[in-house]
Image: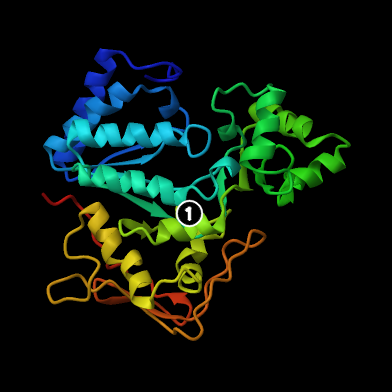
Amino acid sequence: MGNDFKREATQAEIEQMKALLETDLKNGSLGLGTGLEYDPGIYSSTSEVLELAKITSTYGGRYISHMRSEDIYLNQSIDEILTIGREADIPVQISHFKLARKGLWGKSPEILRKLDSARTTGIAVSADIYPYQYWQSSMTVLFPERNFESRETAEFALTELTTPEGMIISTFDAKPEYENLTLAEIAKLRNEDPVTTYIELIKISQKQPGERIIAKSMDLEDIKSILNWPFTNLCSDGSPDGHPRGWGSYPKYLNMDTGQSLEAKINKMTLKAAQNLNLNKIGQIKEGYYADLVLFNLDSIKDKATFENSTLKSEGINFVFVSGEIAYANQMLTKVYSGRIIKRIN
């Protein structure tokens, strides 16, 4: 679709997508992934995603999605992924599952019951989640209609979806002096109200691109509830910098009071993740399986990464083995490259 992506795809374009997807699936891709809250995926219709999911299903692949909405239209987005799972007869995974709106806080048990009900009808729905109340994305993602000058939308975003104090500007190339400040702090520097500042920062970044935010939107009890769902695995959803989840998710989870046993938490990190992606010979300590192992000290393992310094290494990790080779020891990479290409199994 090139740069002309702010629309639904034509049937001819969908056929091109299907051909590209089929080639990838023949070469061992795990399945189909979408980011429906972001450009360009936000402009796609459910029907075009469904056509691609049906191709994926014929090859025994899976569907994983950053859903169309994690806040305002969460329930409709869940309905969409369940529809795709049912009509394409394909396992579906909700990527980095969250209830990112104040009006949804406390409703995770109700939503999980909906997913359980879907599973009883044969829809193999699962999810992954990271153990933080903050997410990371762009400033524009909280404008689902992409109406970036709307004060009404900005006010809603800063009251219902996050707060000026809870929004951290992690990257801002146009004015690097704003980085690591909250929107509230920047508004004070500019002698503006936060809504005005939010709209103005988007305008600035559209002229000189390069921005990321970290924003607090989730309730801790909902995170714990989702972590305890039997079909959830842990994820980081993290890049190497910007948000501490990239370096701290797994040790942080080990230290969280979730009511789970150590064994249950390790299962979420390993076997459940492998099962949700249908990975072969991965996720268990078992003869014939790949020896991908982490040796850690339960008494000292701790995440150190912060929002101010997101790349601090965790403590208490002694060794990491990849395919039986030591890849990490003494807080250092060994530069032994023993990884494998992971391909789909049918």
Q: Amino acid at mark 1?
A: Gly
Say whether residue 292 is left or right of residue 3: left
Name the residue: 20% across, 38% down: 24
Residue 20 appears at what percent x and percent y?
23, 29
Crowding near pointer 1: few (<14 within 10 Å), some, many (20+)? some
State the residue lying farthest toward the right: 191
Name the residue: 24% across, 46% down: 119
Q: Quadrant of residue 309?
A: bottom right
The residue that mark 1 highlights is 238
Q: Is residue 96 visible?
A: no
Residue 149 appears at what percent x and percent y?
69, 21
Front-lying residue, 275 or 5: 275
Question: Helix, strand or loop at disc 1?
Answer: loop
Say whether residue 52 is left or right of residue 80: left
Name the residue: 45% across, 73% down: 254
Say whether residue 128 is left or right of residue 137: left
Total numbered circles: 1
